[in-house]
Amino acid sequence: MKKLYLRTFGCQMNEYDSEKIADVLRVAEGAERTERPEEADVIVFNTCSVREKAQEKVFADLGRVRHLKRAKPDLMIAVGGCVASQEGAAIVERSPFVDVVFGPQTLHRLPELLERRRSSGTPQVDIRFPLIEKFDNLPEPRADGGRALVSIMEGCSKYCSFCVVPYTRGEEVSRPFDDVMAETAKLAGQGVREVTLLGQNVNAWRGTINGAAADFAELLTFVSELSIERIRYTTSHPREFTQRLIDAHAALPKLAPHVHLPVQSGSDRVLAAMKRGYTALEYRSIIRRLRAARPDVSVSSDFIVGFPGETEADFAATLKLARELELDDSYCFIYSPRPGTPAAELPDQIAANAKSERLQRLQTQIQSQADAVSERMIGTTERVLVEGTSRRRIHELAGRTGNNRVVNFAGPTELVHRFTDVRITGRQPHSLRGQLAK
Ligand code: SAM
Ligand code: F3S
């Protein structure tokens, strides 16, 4: 039996793609996954290029597996994901021992590319965007536990001035309604209790339902009729966060009380330079209306600090927005100039030490806001999806609350992959403690 060593970098889209890479290689080559690169027949790095640090990791990792080819000449090394998409054949030029380079939209062709590499003896590169072809060529989904990711759209057409995603993953393409429903229903039939609808901008989803044009809010209504208990989605974009979507949060109890809505900055000047397409006031208005629709909703966000030209006053506006909106645990990033993006050419790049200092201040503030949310949860009863046993205490279970916090509590292993009610009794730095509710 062949062995696959697969490493994933970056976002949930890449995690989803990695599951599919493992699926196609299991079907085509009978390959099972291994955690040890030295016993692999195929090594795949599914890469991320959204920030410089992520990008550098690929070449460091490739350097670490190169020697394995000496002992096993048949070993195949493949690079996929966004670095592959951006660098293409340059990867093979820099690292000639790489056999296959494939993009996020050509992962279903990986077996064919490996085959061609073996028969021709020359490295294969395929990083095209053949629209939605990918989904039509993937094996049936296989549930692995109580929750699953379902991709509903690919790519991004927003072209924020700092971001490589539109170039590496292509323009927005929605997956047809029937496909999304069929995949979700199949997963539900296999025991999945919670789905996360996935895409770079899920609320840009457009489709046809019963012959009529439909949007993301409508898709949610249909998905929530399936026999699953909780629905999440990520990522959504403030520009298309419509009143209809907000109303869906009031109407659909299966929607998790948690929305991840990246704001990036609290300064209108910076938002305009980022080409985000909304103002801080518009973002605030969305959150206010969302909370009116669903008072228990927790909102998390993404922030970039040190965007070119960001002044201390701009940054203060970001801190203020995060504080006033009581944003929950969020991702804070240092701006990383990405080759080929407009922002990388802007004058007035911010010094590295100023960027780190702002990151530190924002993270400290966000952490204390998140702690305050956790503190308020003590004494409440939460609906928890049990994911497995606790990492530190093996006789305990670990699950996730509606607002995406890990909670550890004592309970029988029969509860794994099921929903249960847990009373929150305390908090630790990155998790909660609880007791099974009677
Ligand atoms: N589609 C999502 C959205 O609407 O914002 C985000 C996709 S992006 C892969 C995830 C996050 O990475 C962004 O929200 C942004 O905060 C961060 N990011 C993207 N490009 C970046 C860059 N050049 N430097 C630092 N952070 C970046
Ligand atoms: Fe990137 Fe902006 Fe799209 S952050 S993924 S270009 S919405």
Image: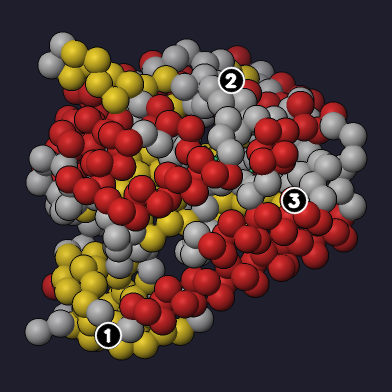
Mark 3 or mark 1, whichever is nearer to me? 3
Q: Residue 374, located in which quarter of the rendered image?
A: bottom left
Q: Which mark is residue 361?
A: none
374 or 108, nearer to the observer: 374
Residue located beneath label 3 in the image:
314
Q: Is 401 on the left-hand or right-hand side of 413?
A: right
Q: Badge 2, how many Cα within 10 Å: few under 14, some, many 20+?
A: many
Q: Of marks 3 and 1, which one's residue comes earlier in the chain?
A: 3
At x 41% / y 81%, what residue is drawn? 375
187 or 69, nearer to the observer: 187
Q: Which mark is residue 379?
A: 1
Residue located beneath label 2 in the image:
127
Mark 1 or mark 2, whichever is nearer to me? 1
At x 34% / y 55%, what residue is drawn? 291
**In the rendered image, which quarter contains the N terminus?**
top left
Give amino acid for label 1.
Gly
